[in-house]
Amino acid sequence: MAVVASRQSSVVLYSDGKDQYCHRVRIVLAVKGVEADIVDVSSDEALCEEVAEINPYGTLPALKDRDFGVFQPAVILAYLDERFPYPPLLPLYPDQRAEIRIMMHDMERLWCEPAQQLLAGNASSSESTSIRNGLVAELSHTEGAFAEKKFFQQDSLTLMDCCLFPFVWRLPLLGIKLPESCQRAIRDYLLRMLEHREFRESLSEQEQEMRPGFVKLG
């Protein structure tokens, strides 16, 4: 794991290297320059006692900051953005912050949650086909949003990119066929994000294997 780690760190993240929600947190930690111990815990395994003490629901990611435990991905991201305010990952003005949060909500509902169903392998064959068709339609419809600005619909990095990058990074695992122009727009977006060292450093070994050789292009 490339996020800076030190056994004297006050922040500990329990993370699954394959999970898109854990990936989000690792990106934010890297962007904020937070020295953190990253403890790899597979979501398929029985969670260790330390995780259970932080999160009674037994899910990852789980974060411990000194003696304070935080769980649920959205709560962890909000906590880190407030706990470590520089660089800020939400705009200054309330209306702009609300706009970002609304877009993140839509992204979660329309893209990330369906993708998670496919990644979990719990959907039936017909359900999987329906989910894939829906994702192709959604991504094709919003293809231009990946190319409008350097970051996703914004002039600067926001929490939205920290949530979007792990999703689009996993697209090869979903078994969907996107139109060539959409694939190109998403590829260019990924490359722009990988120009930032923090995004490269956030990738676990499992995530690097999802797109072999791609990181070297960033």
Image (spheres, rainbow, N blue to C red):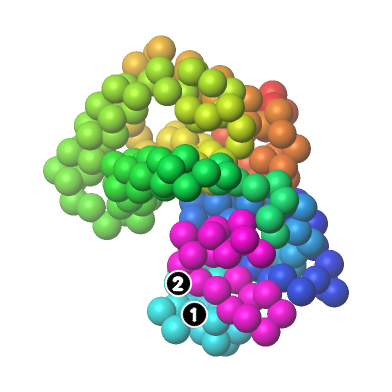
Q: Amino acid at mark 1?
A: Asn
Tell me what residue is drawn at x 60 percent, y 84 percent: 50
The verdict on residue 81 being magenta is yes
In front: label 2 or label 1: 1
Outermost residue, left direction? 126
Tell me what residue is drawn at x 67 percent, y 84 percent: 67
Tell me what residue is drawn at x 22 percent, y 32 percent: 133
Secondary structure of the residue carrying tag 2 is: loop
Which residues are drawn in magenta? 63-83
Locate residue 127 relative to residue 17 in the image: left or right: left
The x and y percentages for residue 62 are 55, 71
Locate residue 139 relative to residue 79 in the image: left or right: left
Who is closer to the viewer here, 59 or 54? 54
The verdict on residue 2 being magenta is no
Q: Quadrant of the C terminus?
A: top right
Tell me what residue is drawn at x 63 percent, y 52 percent: 28
| Residue 147 - label | none
Who is closer to the viewer here, 208 or 166? 166
Instruction: Reply above or below: 66 against 2.
Output: below
Q: Tell me the quarter of the picture where residue 59 sits.
A: bottom left
- Circles 2 and 1 in contact, beta carbons < 8 Å: yes
Task: Return the residue at label 2.
Answer: 59
Instruction: Reply above or below: 15 against 198.
Output: below
Can residue 76 be seen here? The reply is yes
Can residue 178 be seen here? The reply is no
Who is closer to the viewer here, 92 or 163? 92
Task: Return the residue at label 1.
Answer: 55
The x and y percentages for residue 205 are 66, 49
Q: CA distance from mark 2 to mark 1?
A: 7 Å
Secondary structure of the residue carrying tag 1 is: loop
Locate residue 9 relative to residue 209 in the image: left or right: right
